[in-house]
Image (cartoon, helix red, strand yellow):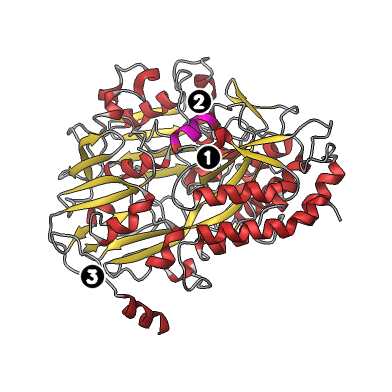
């Protein structure tokens, strides 16, 4: 028996103690929940007052960055704010396919690989200027420009005719953009893909009358983004307390109709005070409710919990290269370059236990990089590594990771000390114990893994360092919102800025290209391609998914017409309240609580 096998008993005790610390409830520890039991639309059918202010809690343990424009933002907290005062020109259904219900309608011409868009005649920016085809084309010109430093230049933009040449600085204009009249834009594509009509079109215009005199490199930091952001959504920004809150008032000129509410205030709420803020009515609704706190609070009397399978997954990523001249360059000398090491680290962790003990079933073991939020494409038949420390030890032994100096930790294949730096984000009560669990799990198979700088990283710092390929980071724990389009090239393509592991291969290129090919308009063919791609990622392991996620959203019972997810037919301008003040939670005495539990 090896020393790594002997550690299992000690490791089990460590795991148990971590789970006890991480579990928030001291009773009903075996109670599990299912996301299938939740609704996406609030059931309150009361009459809205036609006024009032909604308080939206943005759950975050750090300030929001404040890049409040679709064309420049990079983090989820910012888009949570943007979505209240701006929106896509194109609407989608429950399967993430475009409909004709948005602020722009469209006609597709497959013979010419073009789409002609007609913007609603009544669609105006918040300052009264019309939203024009020129604004929409201007967004493409900015995001595709060589001086643009953001992360929004993706396959969707590069497939526009003439965009690659423009992006490379070889052309001054984008040949595939044609402004027909003030409200009509025609876009021609050199590569017309299935993704285009399933949420793959960049549909976020940029107000040219505001931004045209700002140098592109300065736009993201300008007052027009940071202090006075503009949109055409149901609410418009009135004031900002940087990093803390945004106050908005209704846009009476909103194209769908006048909003029910007088205004909306977005307020950052620390995960540790979400429950208290909801119970006291300090907030009406939050961006997401910490799944680890749901079990103890699911009987909160003044809210209704909505829920859905989140378009997201948590994952462990491995640094395999760098970002250079707009594309990924892999480095075979990186510490994590051996796939056997990566595979062993996947086998070493027990994500089922993480999902059950920390999240009471509202997160669950993940297998592939296309989550079940896309049921047509998620392949649940693929066999991915699951918790098996014996298998992890076997892989490491055979790959040459041996404890040469008998200090309890394996050396690398050349007999040198192997210390793996692990970056993980702060946030909520479970962040620290889960990070500690992963490190203990890897230690149990003889790998020395330590927290980067000896602590968790706050959200903005974490992503700044990951994006910059900080050489101190070997492994990191992140989470991806996959968006509505199933195409994974925006996260794992060779030219994708979000390809944080810096992974590339010819087979990956081939499969991602096939997923966007003419043949992929056949849904069955596209499913088979993405099944192959999911299998490739299980074999290559640039990252491995840990848990799939539920999105849980509590809504105060005074709120009507609140919905989450796509294709509900309920829009933000319809949200209203039935009374001026939020409803506060009833206080349940311990005796009453015990009686309810007994029922």
Numbered disc 1: secondary structure: loop
Which of discs 3 and 2 lies nearer the camera? The answer is 3
Task: From the viewer's side, name the closer residue of 520 and 329.
Answer: 329
Task: Estimate the spatial distance between the alpha carbons at disc 3 and disc 2, rounded to whole Å.
Answer: 48 Å
Numbered disc 3: secondary structure: loop
Does 444 appear above or below 186? below
Per the rendering, the mark at residue 539 is: none
Task: From the viewer's side, name the closer residue of 593 and 17.
Answer: 17
- Pointer 1 or 2: first along the chain: 1
Stretch of the chain drawn in magenta: 460-465
The image quarter in which residue 515 lies: top right
- Residue 61 falls left or right of residue 463: left
Per the rendering, the mark at residue 163 is: 2
Task: From the viewer's side, name the closer residue of 102 and 414.
Answer: 414
Question: Quadrant location of the N terminus?
Answer: bottom right
Label count reads 3
Q: Residues within 10 Å of mark 3 (few under 14, many from 20)?
A: few
In the rendered image, which residue does mark 3 sit on? 45
Task: Estimate the spatial distance between the alpha carbons at disc 3 and disc 1, rounded to whole Å.
Answer: 47 Å
Q: Residue furthest bottom?
A: 599
Per the rendering, the mark at residue 111 is: 1
- Residue 531 falls left or right of residue 560: right
Numbered disc 2: secondary structure: helix
Residue 433 covered by magenta stretch: no
Task: From the viewer's side, name the closer residue of 193 and 263.
Answer: 263
Does 468 appear above or below 377? above
Tell me where residue 120 appears, x and y as whole percent: 27, 42
């Amino acid at each position: 028996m090896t020393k790594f096998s002997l550690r299992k008993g000690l490791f089990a005790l460590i795991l148990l103690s971590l789970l006890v610390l991480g579990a928030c409830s001291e009773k009903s520890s075996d109670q599990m929940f299912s996301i299938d039991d939740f609704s996406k639309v609030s059931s309150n059918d009361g009459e809205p007052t036609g006024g009032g202010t909604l308080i939206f809690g943005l759950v975050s343990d750090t300030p929001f960055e404040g890049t409040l424009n679709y064309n420049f933002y990079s983090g989820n907290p910012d888009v949570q704010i943007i979505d209240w005062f701006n929106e896509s020109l194109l609407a989608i259904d429950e399967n993430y396919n475009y409909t004709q219900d948005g602020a722009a309608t469209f006609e597709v011409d497959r013979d010419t690989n073009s789409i002609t868009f007609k913007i609603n005649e009544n669609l105006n920016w918040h300052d009264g200027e019309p939203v024009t085809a020129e604004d929409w084309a201007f967004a493409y010109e900015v995001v595709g420009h060589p001086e643009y430093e953001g992360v929004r230049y993706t396959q969707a933009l590069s497939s526009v005719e003439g965009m690659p040449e423009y992006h490379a600085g070889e052309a001054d204009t984008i040949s595939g953009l044609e402004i027909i009249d003030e409200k009509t834009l025609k876009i021609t594509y050199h590569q017309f893909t299935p993704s285009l009509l399933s949420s793959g079109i960049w549909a976020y215009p940029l107000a040219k009358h505001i931004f045209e005199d700002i140098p592109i490199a300065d736009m993201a930091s300008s007052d027009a983004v940071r202090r006075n952001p503009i949109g055409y959504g149901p609410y418009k920004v009135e004031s900002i307390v940087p990093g803390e809150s945004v106050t908005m008032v209704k846009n009476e000129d909103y194209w769908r109709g006048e909003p029910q509410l007088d205004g909306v205030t977005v307020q950052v709420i620390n995960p540790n005070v979400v429950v208290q803020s909801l119970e006291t009515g300090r907030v009406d609704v939050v961006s997401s409710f910490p799944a680890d706190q749901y079990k103890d609070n699911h009987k909160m009397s003044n809210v209704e919990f909505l829920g859905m399978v989140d378009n997201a997954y948590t994952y462990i990523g491995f640094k395999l290269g760098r970002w250079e001249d707009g594309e990924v360059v892999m480095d075979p000398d990186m510490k994590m370059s051996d796939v056997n090491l990566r595979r062993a680290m996947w086998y070493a962790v027990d994500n089922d236990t993480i999902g059950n003990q920390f999240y009471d079933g509202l997160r669950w073991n993940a297998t592939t990089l296309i989550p079940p939020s896309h049921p047509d494409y998620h392949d649940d038949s693929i066999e991915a590594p699951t918790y098996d420390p014996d298998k992890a030890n076997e892989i490491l032994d055979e790959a040459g990771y041996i404890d040469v100096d008998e200090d309890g930790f394996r050396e690398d294949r050349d007999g040198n000390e192997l210390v793996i730096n692990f970056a993980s984000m702060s946030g909520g009560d479970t962040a620290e114990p889960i990070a500690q669990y992963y490190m203990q799990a890897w230690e149990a198979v003889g790998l020395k893994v330590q927290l980067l700088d000896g602590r968790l990283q706050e959200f903005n710092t974490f992503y700044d360092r990951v994006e910059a390929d900080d050489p101190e980071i070997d492994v990191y724990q992140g989470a991806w919102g996959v968006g509505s389009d199933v195409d994974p090239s925006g996260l794992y393509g060779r030219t994708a800025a979000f390809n944080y592991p810096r992974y590339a291969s010819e087979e990956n290129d081939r499969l991602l290209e096939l997923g966007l090919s003419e043949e992929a308009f056949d849904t069955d063919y596209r499913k088979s391609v993405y099944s192959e791609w999911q299998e490739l990622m299980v074999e290559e392991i640039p990252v491995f998914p840990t848990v799939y996620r539920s999105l849980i959203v509590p809504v105060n019972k005074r709120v009507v017409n609140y919905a989450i997810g796509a294709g509900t037919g309920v829009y933000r301008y319809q949200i209203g309240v039935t009374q001026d003040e939020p409803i506060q939670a009833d206080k349940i005495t311990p005796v009453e609580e015990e009686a309810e539990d007994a029922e």
